[in-house]
Image (cartoon, coloured by chain):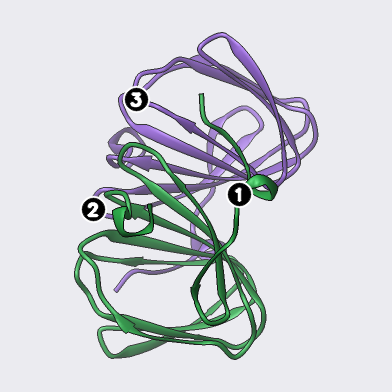
Chain colours: A green, B purple
Amino acid sequence: MPHIKLFEIEEKILFEGYHGKIMHGEKITVAHIRIKANSPLPEHAHPHEQVVNLIEGEFHLTVDGVEYRMLGGESFVIPSNVPHSAKSVTDCYIVDVFTPTRDDWK
Amino acid sequence: MPHIKLFEIEEKILFEGYHGKIMHGEKITVAHIRIKANSPLPEHAHPHEQVVNLIEGEFHLTVDGVEYRMLGGESFVIPSNVPHSAKSVTDCYIVDVFTPTRDDWK
C-alpha cells in the first residue's frame, strides 16, 4: 500500500520558484507545492480538472482572464482545459489535485 | 468560477470528532477535515479512490488490516473498495481527495 512520506520524495522544479512533491494514484495526482514569494506562473491549460488548495500564503490566480486573490484556507476548482496563470505574493504552500493523473509529470 | 473560502463553507460532522468542509468539482471531491484527538473512525470502504493528505497531527490509518502510523507531511493512497479505518492520536488536519465525486456527501 502506498504510504508516502513527503520528506522522502524528491522535489521537482515545476517552474522557477515552484517546487513540487508529486504522488500518483490510479486516477488522482496530488502535488504538494512550495512556492517562493513573487513567482509568476505563465498561462497554461491542461485537460485535467484541478483543485487548488492554498494551505498557507497569498496567491493570485487568474482563471480565464479573471484574477482571484486567494489567502490560506481558500480553494479553487479549475475545470478541464481552462487557461490559468498565477503569481505568488508571499511564500505559499499549495496542495494541488488533478484527475486524471498528470502523466506528463511521471 | 468556483473560488471557495473554507470559512464560508458549513462544516459537516462526518463522524463523531470528524468535522469536514467539502467541495465538489466535476470529478473530484476535496474534504478539509479537522479531527479531534483520540477519535476512532470505524472500518468502511467505498468505490472512490482516495488520497489522504495529513497536513498536521498524528493519525493511525489501518488499510486492509495493516496499521500505518502517519505524521504531518505524510500521505496515503487508498485504492477503490479497500476497507480502511483510523484513529487520531492528536488533533489532526487532513485534506482528503476522492474521485469520482462523493455524491453521498452532496
Q: Residues within 10 Å of mark 2 (few under 14, many from 20)?
A: some
Q: Residue at x 76, y 39 (%)?
A: B91
Q: Secondary structure at mark 1?
A: loop
Q: Are the numbered discs 1 and 3 placed on the same chain, yes or no? A: no
From the top left corner, tell me how far across and down residue B73 is, in percent: 68, 47
Tell me the subunit letter for badge 3. B
Q: Which residue type does callout 1 highlight? A: Ile
| B42 relative position to A50: left or right | right
Q: Which residue is mark 3?
A: B80
Q: Nearer the viewer, mark 3 or mark 2?
A: 3
Tell me the subunit letter for badge 1. A
Q: Which residue type does callout 3 highlight? A: Ser
Tell me the subunit letter for badge 2. B
Q: Which residue is mark 1?
A: A9
From the top left corner, tell me how far across and down residue B12 is, in percent: 51, 42
Q: Secondary structure at mark 3?
A: loop
Q: With respect to residue A24, does B68 lie above or below?
A: above
Task: Indicate which disc, 3 or 2, sits on the residue closer to the N terminus.
Answer: 2
Q: Which residue is mark 2?
A: B26
Q: With respect to residue A84, does A74 lie above or below?
A: above
| B56 relative position to A12: left or right | right
Q: Nearer the viewer, mark 2 or mark 1?
A: 1
